[in-house]
Amino acid sequence: MTKVLLATVAVIAFTAPSFAQQDKTTGQAPPSGASSFYVAQDTATMKCHVVNAQPAAGGNMKAIGTAHPTQASAQAALMADKTCKE
């Protein structure tokens, strides 16, 4: 019984990392030559805009969602977002 329990624990210990969710690191610059677009919201007026640089932390603008590879996809995300004021 002990051998079966130890074998089960060993199998779980070696396979658990393969089931872990991969986190995407935010705040990293895109690879050189690539550009990213963000939906940014002004915290005072609650209006949103598409910008080509990630808003700085602690500023009056905050990023809504993740980076978009094209301006068109960022614009589509802006239109679909319900938190932005018209």
Image (cartoon, rainbow, N blue to C red):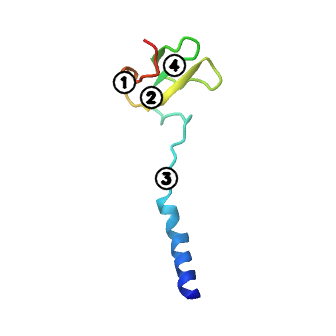
Q: CA distance from mark 2 to mark 1?
A: 18 Å
Q: Residues within 10 Å of mark 4 (few under 14, many from 20)?
A: many
Residue sitting at x 51%, y 65%: 16
Q: Earlier in the sequence, mark 3 or mark 2?
A: 3
**Residue in the foreground of this view, choosing between 11 and 36:** 11
Residue sitting at x 47%, y 30%: 65
Q: CA distance from mark 3 to mark 4?
A: 28 Å
Residue sitting at x 51%, y 19%: 41
Amino acid type of the residue that numbered disc 2 sits on in the rendered structure: Ser
Q: Earlier in the sequence, mark 1 or mark 4?
A: 4
Helix, strand or loop under label 3: loop
Examine the image and state in which quarter residue 28 appears: top right
Task: Please report contact status of discs 1 and 3: CB closer than 8 Å, yes or no.
Answer: no
Task: Please report contact status of discs 2 and 1: CB closer than 8 Å, yes or no.
Answer: no
Residue 24's spot in the image, x, y percent?
51, 43
Q: CA distance from mark 2 to mark 4?
A: 16 Å
- Between marks 2 and 4 in the image, the one whose residue lies nearer the viewer: 4
- Between marks 1 and 3 in the image, the one whose residue lies nearer the viewer: 1
Q: Which residue is mark 1?
A: 80
Q: Is residue 70 visible?
A: yes
Q: Earlier in the sequence, mark 3 or mark 4?
A: 3
The disc placed on residue 36 is 2
Q: Which residue is mark 3?
A: 21
The disc placed on residue 57 is none
Q: On screen, 21 above or below 63?
A: below
**Residue in the foreground of this view, choosing between 37 and 21:** 21
